[in-house]
Image (tube, rainbow, N blue to C red):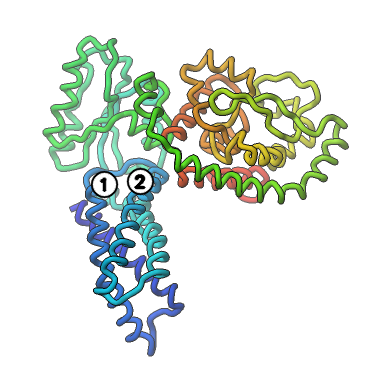
Amino acid sequence: MLVIILLLGDLLSFSLALWVSLTIRYFFVPYGSYLRSYQLFLENNFLPFILVFLLWVLVFYLADFYSTLIIGYRLSLAQSLLKIHFINSVIAVIFFYIFLPYFYIAPKVNLALYLVLSYVFIFLWRGWGLTHLKAAFGGGAFYFIGPETELKELLAAFTYNPYYNNLKVLGAKASQHIKSEADIDLSQIEAEATKGFFAAIVAPTAFGSSYQDNERLVRKFYEPVFKGVQFFSFQKFYESVFHKIPISLVDETWLLENISSPSRDLFDFTKRLIDILISLFAGLVSLIFYPFVILAIKLDDGGPIFYVPERVGQNGKNFRPFKFRTMKVGAPVSWFGKNDPRVTRIGRFLRKTSLDELPQLWNVFLGDISMVGPRPDVADFAKELEQKIPYYKVRTLIKPGLAGWALVSQRVMGENPSSVEETRERLAYDLYYIKNRSFILDLAIILKTIKMVLIRIGIIRKIA
């Protein structure tokens, strides 16, 4: 039943997007004397488009969009849908420009507009409509097994986040406390599946040598599959929910499988081109603010205008960023704290408005950093952190950024974390970005960065 409703919802979304796109394209709503002509035009377009809809549904099926409940936040959905929609868009273009003579229509602008709107409508249906749909069908039930730290985060999310209100947790066990199969009771989750409800076990896909009965433990997760219980990798599930990597499960094997990915030369080239265009335009516009910032810094304490400490760039290569000075002259380098006394009066304003970052647009133009990427560390700090945090150096595999996923996602709202523990969490977000970097994720980071700045300066209010 759930699959049928999903299918009908997808078809309705495709059809509604077509109706809206045709209405926008021809600047009238079907009423009065226009009704008949609009109806004929809609029929002429709808009949060929319905064949495209069926092909799109087939792609959705092949992409597993009708088999399991989508759990993650809407960013994960947006990324998955974008990949599928790109394939569907190619299918639509090929369809109309190969079979065009048989239908006597030339979509062109209509098709371009429709491809945009259909993505919006299917995202709204899957992102918001599906949430209410899950509640109507009784939600689902889970049994969690994972590292203690990340397990606590998952349990908190399923307890306090309204998005998961209709999902039950029937049991949870920290990996560290499991020594044999007797430590796990899956009877409740199996009973839930027997009733016909969605039920799933979320556990690591590999178990360490510390387990005394590893083979029998894995078999215990395998057998419930035949009773209707689904199995989710803890690593992938956690990533989908929090959009960061479970650091406790990161090792050399994980890094080789997930970070040592196929070449992204096309993505990197396109991103570099976009960086040049945006940084050049924004850099030239930002020159308007330079005289005022320079004058304010000089009037404040009369010290140097710029602060240029060495930072670590891609592949460990150091560079010097251009940045307006916000700290007192001679201030020692240490963890940044709330209401840090090292920050000057004008420095607080510059940090709050992010005006101190404006000169770094020229670092983007020169290629030292990108508009989006992991935030670069001060060189001395980086050496210390690499010794204290395993695999910390991995974040230098790609070019650092002016804005970053950790900066807009981590609960700590500031340029830098203030402890090793906060930095370890930042690494979890940075690894997520390195693994999943894409244009839609970059766009999300830029929009979140703008929102964060607007919140800091009081133009919009933060919503809890």
* Residue 444 rendering spot, x and y as whole percentages: 50, 45
- Residue 319: quadrant of the picture: top right
Q: Are marks 1 and 2 in contact (CB under 8 Å)?
A: yes
The vertical placement of 243 against 42, above or below, is above
The vertical placement of 283 against 187, above or below, is below
Q: Which residue is mark 2?
A: 80
Residue occupying the point 24% across, 74% down: 102
* Residue 383 rendering spot, x and y as whole percentages: 58, 16
Q: Please state if 227 lies on the left or on the right of 14 as rendered.
A: left
Residue occupying the point 21% across, 15% down: 214
What whole-number distance in Å separates the C-alpha atoms at marks 1 and 2?
9 Å
> Is residue 288 something one can see in this rendering?
yes
Q: In terms of secondary structure, where does tag 2 sit? A: helix
Residue 426: give its label.
none
Q: Nearer the viewer, residue 52 or 79?
A: 52
* Residue 37 rendering spot, x and y as whole percentages: 34, 85
